[in-house]
Image (tube, grey):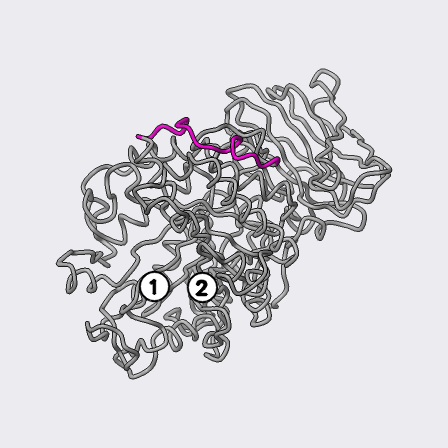
Amino acid sequence: MYGSRYAALAAVCLMTWGCGEPAAQMETGWAEQELAGATASGSIPSGLAARLQVGLFEEHGQTWMKSSGADWDMRYRYFTKGWVNNWGWGEYNGGWGLGYMQESDAQGMTPVVQYYQLFGEAGGGESSTLAKVQNKSTMASYFGDFKILMQRAKDFGKPVVVLLEADGLGFLEQQAKHNPNTYAAIADSGLAELKGLPNSVAGWGLAFLALKKAVGANNAVLGIHVSGWASGKDIAYSSVTDPLQPEVDKVYGFLAPAGLASNVTGTTYDLLVGDPLDRDSDYYRVERGQDRWWDTSDSASVSSKSFNRYAEWLRLWNAKSDKRWVLWQIPLGNSASKNVWNNGGPGEGYKDNRAEYFFAGDTKHLQRFADAGVIALLFGAGAAGVSSYANDTYSDGQLFMKSRVGKFLNAGGLAIDPGGASGGTTTSTSGTTGGSTTGGGGGSAGGYDFEQGTEGWVRGGDSISALSRSTTRAYTGASSLRVQFNGTAGTQLVYVPTPSTPAGKVVTVRIWVPSGSKLTSVQPYLLQGSAGGWAWTGTWRSIGSLSTGSWNEISVTVPANAATPLSQLGLELKTGSGWTGSVWVDSVTW
């Protein structure tokens, strides 16, 4: 385990980003440092690489990113009202959106969708957000379009990241006076897939999860937007001396029932999404007389307008939610920008310090944000006239993002600890990968032996704090899957999405339960997808029927008529409160 972390660190040190001589660094303690993100909670979603992802905004049909020579990871675009039929120029089937996904993939980048349709719906602007979600016909059309997006994502068949409605839940929280049970027309929309959801603002958040599940778009990675001002205090720019934890707790209390915590859909959001600022800091100073600059000093107080404060806010959210972060629409200005409206000339646009904070020196700021849970930085202009990567000429005469970030990416980027439950790939010095990028790809033939990692298994439920490969116990081989509990009671799931288990097979799971645990029952299960009517098959065992301090074998049979691939294969674990121990799972075979 530790060997792979240090190998990844060595790979980072081979870049010419201030690490010095790699051999000398190893002799003086480099090898004892943690991999970036090792202190972050949660895991990198399945299908995304265990490496800091860097991407840009780019329109459909454009090729600047590909021709830049930089090995960009992600490519994003807004999907606004009208995307589903190419704003009247195509069929009403989402084909335009699928084309953007396929185009990004063909250029070697993961597509990212900023689904920003609500504010374009009829009935007013941002101040009418709550009124719109309370309108039955609006919600029927709106979620009908999102269902089409999930269908096209499923057709795409590769990871696609969907960032949902920037600031939408922030406006809903304020307009609903922080009450997630405020009425919204979700089940009342009439969509069959939403009939079991509450007619509430929380139900609005759950609807995206339900539609993804109903369609079976398991490759779609959904991110919920967290606005820094949703609590009523702008933690980044005005209320900078207020303690952060109370504001995090207040907004989390609103978002938890909307899909961050366990809910009736049986799934939760994959990521948190934030936008540090929508346009260059000096755009606000020059054009609006507002101060949006952040102090870059590493010693700046978290009670000041600083990168340190924002990173601490991210860290608190990461710890609270157990989710990693994507930061998007990050401004592109630098210290050489001319502070004029950008008409395309060299250096036009407004000054900002975010690009330089992350990429003008060594990797320490990238590592700091990775430790706070950040796995992706996506840069793009949020309005006309501001700085752009196409003409962000720096003091050395080169385009900043193309030259500086290109050098960073082409040297291998920054490896990130994937987390105990990650299905992400792990970068190593040999260029190989560890773990599984999809649910069915890990483990031995006909099962999972956890010799190479968690092999795509993930956790569902607030009581499980981590999944990890462990050499403490093993049924076969040298390792097993360790499931750690955090002391809260509840029904938890540990599972692998879309396993390759065939219909008719008998699946046997081996589980070690320590004496004194507060486990009350164990149930190996399998869940079919929408084609199988979401049918559940399980073998329930009470804790009294299991042997403690030894391995137990429990089998469950996949129905002969099951629709495959399955949606999930895993274990349902029920616990009482107050227990912070672990169980081990190994040799899941068929």
Res. 32 in view: no
Residue found at the far left of this picture: 289
Q: Nearer the viewer, mark 2 or mark 1?
A: 2
Residue of label 2: 54
Instruction: Quadrant for residue 49, please give it.
Output: bottom right
Q: Main secondary structure of the magenta part?
A: loop
Q: CA distance from mark 2 to mark 1?
A: 11 Å
Mark number, residue 358 = 1
400 displayed left or right of 104 = left
Residue found at the far top of this picture: 544
Give neighbour class at mark 1: few <14, some 14-19, many 20+ (Cα, 10 Å).
some
Location of residue 314 with respect to 67 vertically, above or below: above
Quadrant for the C terminus, please.
top right
Count the labels in the image: 2
Q: Residue at x 42, y 37 (%)?
A: 133
Residues under numbered marks 2 and 1 in contact, where contact means CB atoms less than 8 Å apart: no
The amino acid pointed to by label 1 is: Phe
Q: Nearer the viewer, residue 335 or 580?
A: 335
Instruction: Quadrant for residue 57, please give it.
Output: bottom left
Say which element carries label 1: helix
Q: Which residues are magenta?
A: 177-192
Q: Residue at x 26, y 78 (%)?
A: 347
Say which element carries label 2: strand
Q: Nearer the viewer, residue 362 or 179?
A: 179
Mark number, residue 63 = none
Q: Residue at x 43, y 74 (%)?
A: 406
The amino acid pointed to by label 2 is: Val
On the image, the x and y values in percent for residue 6 come to 52, 59
Give neighbour class at mark 2: few <14, some 14-19, many 20+ (Cα, 10 Å).
many
Residue found at the far bottom of this picture: 397
On the image, the x and y values in percent for residue 18 come to 36, 70
Q: Nearer the viewer, residue 126 or 390?
A: 126
